[in-house]
């Protein structure tokens, strides 16, 4: 017998002694737990915490039905939602198998048993479980990281992260461009957090949130008697940020009357509070952000060209969520996990229709809009999976981003992309991925082997 794979525990719930032996023989690499009833199954679940369970729905005292199997499925999903459950079913019970997946099962397999294919399905389940565990550990270990809140798999964003790490330790004035809700302040905080200034203050100021007549005094401070109501000296935001980083959000909304004074500060690194003729030196890193097109504003005469060049020593372009391939779904799952935990709910994921809605919607409000919609859905959901109706999104007829990819109509290179995308969208559920791609499961297994497609942890 081969050496057991460390910490891999498989619980087989089956009342047929012959099938028990066959299944046990199939999986001689794992630690096997065997039982044929509800009580023993739950005892094994609590005591040994198996990562994967194979479950026959037809168990005593209802061997001809499925009531006991569904009861065990619901209990496992409630007690250990991370456990991957594979339903073993007869050829005439496909409807029950599909229903089981809707209730949280990972996959199903129809008898008679083919050892190679079943081992493949179970191995995928173990690998997915291990990947999710690694992701959870990574998330816990990176809580103090300045870029911990950034969740992405898109190449554009990963490239941006590397750029942030490279430029963070310089004092170059940095301009972050991106639509509202794309996470510009998160990137600004990462620039500060990766820099040698990280122990000093990070001072954000949103130009759009401050009335124009107060902006100058907020930024540069004022002397006592500078204007009516100035009863004492007050430091401005720039001076308060001395030694640290000043983040000026929505810099495109800065009035022309103040742009000249900001330009002088950037050139000389000194400020003059209102009512004072004294220059105060300030050592501060400047990071700015805007959703507006500054070059168009320059041509219109509403933004100074010389200020633009001072602000844009380094320019970081933050892509919209619709341009970050696959990120909407990854972020949706992260938000759902967080809200489910906060609300004490057992929400296990999204229906296929909800996934299609998330993937096809344009997300004009970007990550902020996505977060709000997932929060709403986590509150409104009646079942343990989020439906398209729960999301409350309007129909999006203009966007034809489709999940219904048919492998017969694509070339070999596109097949690899289609399979990887389908596996990600279905959380590596082979049955659902095969249905999504328009092929049978055996065909999908063949293609996965052909293209050497593996789980993310390799």
Image: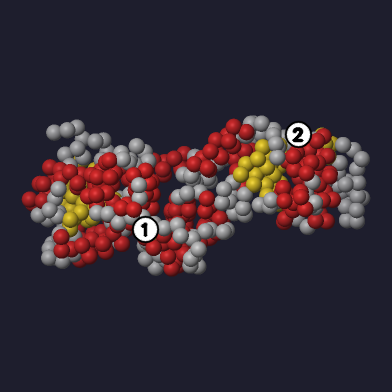
How many other residues sit within 10 Å of disc 2, few (<14), some (14-19) or many (≥20)?
some
Residue located 66% across and 31% down the image: 170
Residue located 19% across and 47% down the image: 118
Between label 2 and label 1, give the one nearer the viewer.
Answer: 1
Q: Secondary structure at mark 2?
A: loop
Instruction: Give the quarter of the figure containing the C terminus.
Output: top left
Residue located 62% across and 41% down the image: 316
Instruction: Give the quarter of the figure containing the N terminus.
Output: top left
Q: In the picture shown, does residue 360 fall above or below 287?
A: below
Residue 127 visible to the viewer: yes
Residue 404: image tag: 1
Residue located 73% across and 36% down the image: 284
Q: Is residue 351 left or right of residue 37?
A: right
Residue 202 point in image, percent of width and height: 67, 42
Q: Secondary structure at mark 1?
A: loop
Residue 404 point in image, percent of width and height: 36, 58
Foreground of the two, 102 or 300:
300
Q: In the picture shown, does residue 170 fall above or below 91?
A: above
Residue 104 point in image, percent of width and height: 31, 58
To which quarter of the image does residue 119 belong?
top left
Residue 350 point in image, percent of width and height: 39, 59
Residue 236 visible to the viewer: no
Q: Is residue 447 left or right of residue 339?
A: left
Foreground of the two, 417 or 374:
417
Residue 125: image tag: none
In contact (CB < 8 Å): disc 2 and disc 1: no
Along the polypeptide, which appears first: circle 2 or circle 1? 2
How many other residues sit within 10 Å of disc 1, few (<14), some (14-19) or many (≥20)?
few
On the image, numbered disc 2 is attached to which residue?
283
């Amino acid at each position: 017998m081969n050496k057991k794979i460390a910490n891999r525990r498989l619980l087989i719930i089956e009342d047929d002694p012959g099938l028990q032996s066959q299944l046990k023989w199939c999986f001689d690499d794992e630690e096997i737990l065997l039982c044929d009833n509800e009580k023993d199954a739950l005892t094994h679940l609590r005591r040994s915490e198996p990562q994967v369970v194979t479950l026959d729905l037809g168990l005593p005292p209802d061997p001809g039905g499925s009531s006991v199997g569904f009861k065990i499925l619901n209990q496992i999903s409630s007690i250990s939602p991370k456990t991957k459950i594979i339903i073993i079913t007869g050829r005439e019970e496909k409807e029950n198998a599909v229903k089981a997946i809707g209730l949280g099962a990972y996959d199903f397999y129809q008898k008679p048993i083919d050892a190679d294919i079943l081992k493949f399905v179970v191995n995928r389940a173990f690998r997915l479980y291990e990947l999710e565990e690694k992701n959870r550990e990574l998330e816990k270990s990176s809580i103090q990281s300045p870029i911990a809140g950034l969740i992405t798999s898109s190449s554009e964003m990963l490239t941006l992260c590397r750029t942030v790490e490279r430029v963070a330790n310089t004092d170059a004035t940095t301009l972050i461009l991106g639509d509202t809700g794309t996470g510009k302040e998160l990137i600004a905080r990462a620039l500060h957090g990766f820099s040698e200034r990280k122990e000093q203050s990070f001072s954000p100021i949103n130009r759009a949130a401050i009335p124009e007549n107060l902006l100058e005094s907020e930024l540069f401070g004022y002397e006592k008697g500078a204007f009516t109501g100035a009863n004492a000296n007050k430091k401005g935001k720039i001076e308060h940020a001395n030694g640290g980083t000043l983040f000026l959000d929505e810099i495109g909304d800065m009035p022309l009357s103040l742009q000249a004074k900001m330009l002088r500060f950037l050139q000389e690194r000194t400020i003059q509070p209102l009512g004072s003729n004294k220059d105060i030196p300030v050592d501060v890193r400047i990071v700015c952000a805007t959703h507006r097109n500054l070059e168009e504003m320059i041509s219109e005469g509403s933004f100074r060209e010389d200020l633009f060049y001072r602000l844009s020593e380094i320019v970081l372009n933050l892509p919209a969520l619709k341009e970050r391939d696959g990120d909407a779904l990854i972020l949706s799952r992260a938000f759902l996990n967080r809200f489910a935990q906060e609300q004490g709910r057992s929400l296990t994921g999204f229906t296929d229709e909800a996934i299609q809605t998330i993937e096809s919607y344009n997300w004009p409000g970007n990550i902020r809009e996505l977060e709000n919609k997932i929060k709403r859905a986590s509150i409104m959901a009646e079942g343990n999976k989020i439906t398209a109706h729960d999301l409350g999104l309007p129909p999006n007829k203009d966007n034809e981003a489709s999940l219904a990819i048919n492998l017969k109509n694509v070339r070999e290179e596109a097949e690899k992309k289609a399979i990887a995308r389908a596996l990600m969208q279905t959380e590596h559920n082979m049955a659902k991925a095969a249905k999504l791609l328009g092929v049978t499961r055996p065909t999908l297994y063949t293609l996965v082997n052909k293209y050497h497609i593996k789980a993310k942890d390799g």
